[in-house]
Image (cartoon, rainbow, N blue to C red):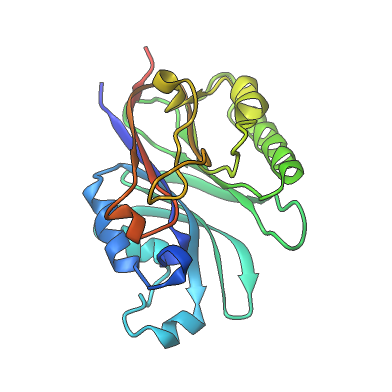
Amino acid sequence: MGVLRICSYNIHKGFSQFNRRMVVHELRERLRSLDVDLVFLQEVQGLNVRHRVRHADWPQQPQHEFLAEDNWGQTAYGRNAVYDHGHHGNAILSRHDILSTANEDVSAHRFESRGLLHCEVSVPEFAAPVHCVCVHLGLTAGGRRRQMQALADRMERLAPNGSPLIIAGDFNDWRNHADELIGARLRLTEAFGVNRGRPARSFPSVLPFFRLDRIYVRGFRVRQAKVHFGEPWAQISDHAALTADLEPAP
């Protein structure tokens, strides 16, 4: 059986911690060094006219296309936050065919735009498509609860009967309510919880303390999972990158 290697990463719109410098080029090289098949990205800049003017080496194409170029043949982007000079959201990069894509607005209030980017991906080891959802949940507990409710409702409707499923992203869930709100309901396994008993520490990237980012799977066995923090990752984003090696569950 083949291994599907995935990554989840909040890329902070291509800027280092505290927005000190633009790091999208270093980000692309670090992502490629992970040699992953599927990438779940949050805070992806689809367009920013101001940055294009201020930075001579700002990519001309949207960040997800720039990051995927020559390495991940398929991309999907969910535009969430829209403003006068651009927009940002979530993205999925894939070495396998993306069969469908949809972005569901789950914003808890008008000051914080959030979405669920849901793709169906053709993975050779599976007869049915693998449902992949990239999430970036809100900053308030009540908002996150409603967003996880919407996520569980969606997947029960569109990925029933144990369909293979990967949900990854920045949950902002430092109290770990996601295990009960979506984990138990959708019969998910958290990639780091398999061996450690709880999600990985992923924020801040220089020396992680808070458990904000997750990789949940169904229909897979987690072979190994790793947190990428410290140098050089701490120079790229305020979040650590998470990777997991998955194989089809027997």
Label count reads 0
Percent coordinates x, y for residue 188 in the rendering? 53, 23
Is residue 178 or residue 98 the one in the foreground? 178
Is residue 200 or residue 92 the one in the foreground? 200
Instruction: Tell whether 203 sits left or right of 250.
Output: right
Q: Against 50, is 165 above or below?
A: above
Percent coordinates x, y for residue 84 in the rendering? 63, 80
Mark yes or no: residue 78 visible: yes
Percent coordinates x, y for residue 181 in the rendering? 67, 28
Q: Quadrant of residue 150?
A: top right
Q: Quadrant of the C terminus?
A: top left
Q: Quadrant of residue 38?
A: top left
Q: Quadrant of the N terminus?
A: top left
Residue at point 76%, 42% (across, down): 142
Q: Against 57, is 26 above or below?
A: above
Mark yes or no: residue 97 visible: no
The single residue placed furthest to the top in the displayed view is: 250
Instruction: Tell whether 133 sits left or right of 58.
Output: right
Residue at point 65%, 30% (across, down): 177
Is residue 116 or residue 28 the one in the foreground? 28
Residue at point 63%, 28% (across, down): 182
Percent coordinates x, y for residue 143 in the rendering? 74, 46
